[in-house]
Image: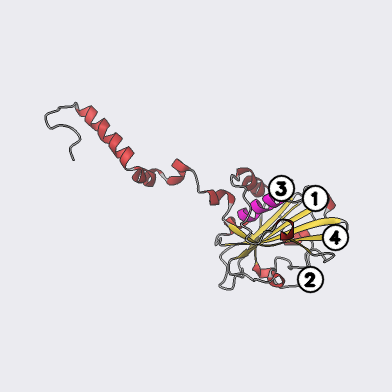
Amino acid sequence: MRLLPSNLWLPKKVLILLSGVIVLTGASGAVAVFVGRDAILGPPAERISGVACTTIMTVRQSRDGQEWLRRYIRANAADGDMRIKTALRVAGALSNQEHADLYQVVLLDEAGPAVRAGMRGRAIGAEVLFSREPGKIAGLTAAFQASYVEGTAAENGEFYGERKALKLDEIKGIVTAMADRTDCLDPDATGENAIASAGGEPAGEDHAAASGDGEAAAPPQEHAAASVH
């Protein structure tokens, strides 16, 4: 296809300029390859705010006059960094939806357990605790605590990597940079009935400490060791 009549003469500099315009407008994909996608469009949303997830259940507990709200979620996130970002995002969304003294988000793999009794120990890929008034919660010294297991989950959904507790600056950086604040998809949500009540069940009974050996309930600081003011 001819762009210009054969008998039309243009200066060499004009031809070079026209060629450059054609290349840039018609080959933006190639430009992205050379320059880098993130430099042009910014990093993918999941790298900042975590991945999509599904709510398994949300349980409200009463303990010593306090309301504890625990949400179990499931996500397909092979990277530990993506898991903890997802859990932090959901903790923020949950705290904006419901009132509680303590919010806890437990993230499981897609292949993880389907019954609540199994949602503990090595089944936990990431965990976040949040309280607006941490001084009221025994063992919680700051607003946030967060931890995740490095590496991918096994075929049965269990995590056997090293558990990493986030540092103060890491949590602050993630929460500050987060653009997406959406909650998990909840296929069974029916308004107020979506939150089950655990009555006087001891907090933390549903899962053991991060060691994954299924032992007795641990205080909040043993579930996730890092904090943010």
Residue bounds of the magenta highlight: 85-94
| Chain-order first, disc 1 or disc 4 | 4
Q: How many marks?
A: 4
Tell me how far mark 3 sits from mark 1, CA to CA.
17 Å
Q: Quadrant of the N terminus?
A: top left
> Which is closer to the viewer, label 3 or label 1?
3
Which label sits on residue 216? 2
In terms of image quadrants, where is residue 226? bottom right
> Which is closer to the viewer, label 1 or label 4?
4
Tell me how far mark 4 sits from mark 3, CA to CA.
21 Å
Q: Position of residue 153 (x, y in %)?
A: 57, 68
| Chain-order first, disc 4 or disc 3 | 4
Tell me how far mark 3 sits from mark 2, CA to CA.
31 Å
Which label sits on residue 20? none
Q: Which structural element holds mark 1?
A: helix
For mark 2, does the 10 Å Cα neighbourhood hold few (<14), some (14 to 19), or many (20 or more) residues?
A: few
